Image (cartoon, rainbow, N blue to C red):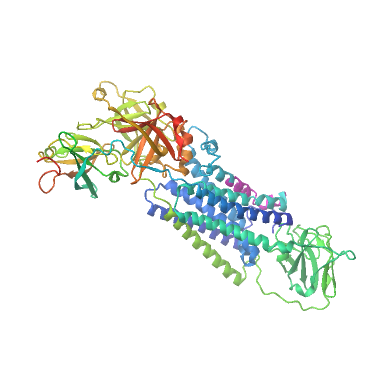
Amino acid sequence: MIRALRVRHRRMAVALALVLPTLVVAALAVRRPIGVVADSNPARGSAGRVVGERQGRYADGSPLSVRLHRDDATAVPALSVSVPSVALFGRPEVLAYWTSAGDGGSVEQGTLLGAVHGDVPLGLPAGVSETPGFLVLYDLAHGEVVATVSLVSSTGRVPGDAP
Amino acid sequence: MSLGYRAVGWNRQKLRYDAVLVGGVVLFLAAFIGIGAIVRPEATVETLWIRGLGTCALFLLHVVLSIGPLARIDQRFLPLLYNRRHLGVATFLVGAAHAGFSLFQFHALGGVDPLVSVLTANPRYGSLGQFPFEVLGLGALGVLFLMAATSHDFWLHNLTAPVWKALHMLVYPAYALLVAHVATGVLQAETDPGLAVLLGLGVLWVVVLHVVAAFGERPLDRERSPDAEDPFVDVCAVDEIPESRARVVTLAGERVAVFRYDGKVSAVSSVCQHQNGPLGEGRVIDGCITCPWHGYQYLPETGASPPPFTERVPTFRVRIEDRRVLVDPRPNPPGTRIEPARIEAAGAHVTTDEFYVGYAPTAPRRLAQRTRRVAIGLLALASVIPVVLAVRQSRFEDGSFEYGTVRGFEGILEARPYPHLLVARPGTPGTGASSWSSWPLVAFGKRGAGEIAAGLDGRPVRLEGELIYRGGRTMFEIVGPGIEPMPPPSGAALLALPRPERQDLGEWTLVGEIVDAKCWLGVMKPGRSKPHRACAARCIAGGIPPLFVVREADGREEAFLLVSSAGGPVHAEVAPLVAEPIEITGRIVRDGDRYALRADPRTYRRVD
């Protein structure tokens, strides 16, 4: 290299030594997380107390756990069910149905509880213990049942349901 | 040395050099993409390629920038310098592939030319954290292109070596741009400290090497001047110059190489005419001064390359008095024959260090062994670094895009606030359950479905397309013509069903991030945060519904459809606010199972 370029290189090396570490540190210092909020779902928080947890399986055999809630604040204590949203990662909209055993798990004959969404509890029909049945999770976009869960405990009743 | 212009003057060393280079690039990409696919199976292959190519180019640039100063500090690194231009061209090609994939992924298939999009999608030039990092990468790529395009000796010869070298010193600004590109880009979202440490180590390595090399040479540039009585300058004792080697001094503004060979001393400019390499660090081989960089040769007495070659360097008059070498600092025109000074008594010491000439059939044994070890070390780095990078990158979202799987659905199309399909749910609705699923509709690329859905508002339709979904949320990309109204009476049953109920859930103030629904739901990984900012802005401006994603302390996320305070769509006005912390105060309205946040976009506030 000719001398003028050597001088330029020397100056550039000093400039890079000063600028680059500063730039990297400054860029890392200004990183900001998006932030979190205490509660963002107005539909949450009205589920009442958790009275039970039932285990089931997805169609592919992987385990699924659902929670039963009882809300005593209403005139007639209401039962609801929630499905952890983590269970739905990687799935389209999943609808929850209550189907009686006699319907053979058909969602066409079942009672639509709603779309499973962010742990929001879905109200169960009154007297679910009186009619043997299942909670069915149905993937509408693919037209397939993704899980079936029995809500009945070893006592033969749905936990939290009125005797 | 060559007489004519050839694309590449191949020889054994260059072939080996390039084989290692290609092997290293393949190894790097295979390690990053292979390990990335294993540890992050949710990642899309495009993302792995983009990241793999980008990190590979940055790694190559670190190698390129290390060779020069290493060779200055220790001449045993000179074999790496011999074919450095191929390394530079490879760096550009890998970087260009990274840019090409990124340009297509983040900027193409929208309403704006991709290159225009790079410059305009993110207007936050005044913010360091939100700076449009793509522009920095584009600038660096431009410089690398300029260097790659002019790397051939054709340009070196026609531009002249000083201009060519000055041009190629733009690699330092290009490196700075790339470091800034990474620091203000992917590192704004990837918070693993290991990644920042790796970049920091790379930067430190490069700047320390260059500072050490640059300042290590400084003493050599101290000028020696003649005294008033004698125009010749005393440069050294004869015995200080090893046989066939040179002593370098700075005279009249430039370095001069004083060579000792065969009982004679000659002085020529130390600046090789080929690439301005340090001739004074060369050696006299076969009677010719041989440049250590690329082996260009000059006769010591004339400074001219032996025929048929035509390069010439200035010569200097030399005399010896009392075994001291004296040089006239006034250069003679290049190629001027100057009689060498004779050394009366021989007895020079001979150096035994090996000297590398790239076009020689074989390299000296010890030098070849060392170069092999360095190459193996570089290949090891090219396999370890990508593994670290692949493992350290954060987890991607779980969304899915059923690209290529076309399905058909029937439902009622609603155009406001954004086109969506109401799909009837089977079964008997229980208390509070909606009979409808509401799936937002989008078109191919970064476009909403507004145009496709025009004139079909409220009508039963049958459409074809591909599903996009994440965490229970579903979207539908219409494919091709893909949509047709259902003739009566086939849609009558759908029209008879009650529409979803609307419920105002009150005013809320939330902090979160604006994303475009399509990418966030599964088309892109990641479909949020800084690296995806330009794409999200382009998608929202193109008509894709914006979502406001809010994260709760326990990790759960809610996504609200953003609408104006009157319930209408919002697009370009919110695009500049994507991918950064935003606070919105508005009313949450539930339509069936869909939650929307109604607020005037002018009241959205950046969270500082």
Tell whether B264 sits left or right of B67. right
Circle count: 0
Dominant secondary structure (helix, strand or loop) of the stretch shown in magenta: helix
Locate residue A79 relative to residue B218 in the image: left or right: left
In the rendered image, the quadrant that contains the N terminus of chain B is: bottom right
Is B113 magenta? The answer is: no
Residue B568: image x %, image y %? 39, 26
Residue B501 visible in the current orientation: yes
| Image vertical order of residue B300 relative to residue B103, above or below | below
Task: Specify start and end residues of the magenta stretch as a single range.
Answer: B140-158
Q: Residue furthest top?
A: B488
Check the image and name the residue furthest to the front: A73
Q: Quadrant of residue B328?
A: bottom right
Residue B130, given in percent of the width and then of the height, sits at 51, 42
Residue B149 falls inside the magenta stretch: yes
Residue B444: image location, x then y, percent? 41, 34
- Residue B93 visible to the viewer: no
Nearer to us in this view, B51 or B210: B210
Q: Is residue B474 left or right of residue B316?
A: left
A15 or B334: nearer the viewer: A15
Residue A85 lies, with reference to residue B382, above or below; the image says above
Query: Eyeballing the image, is B494 above or below A133?
Result: above
Residue B113 at x, y = what percent?
A: 52, 34
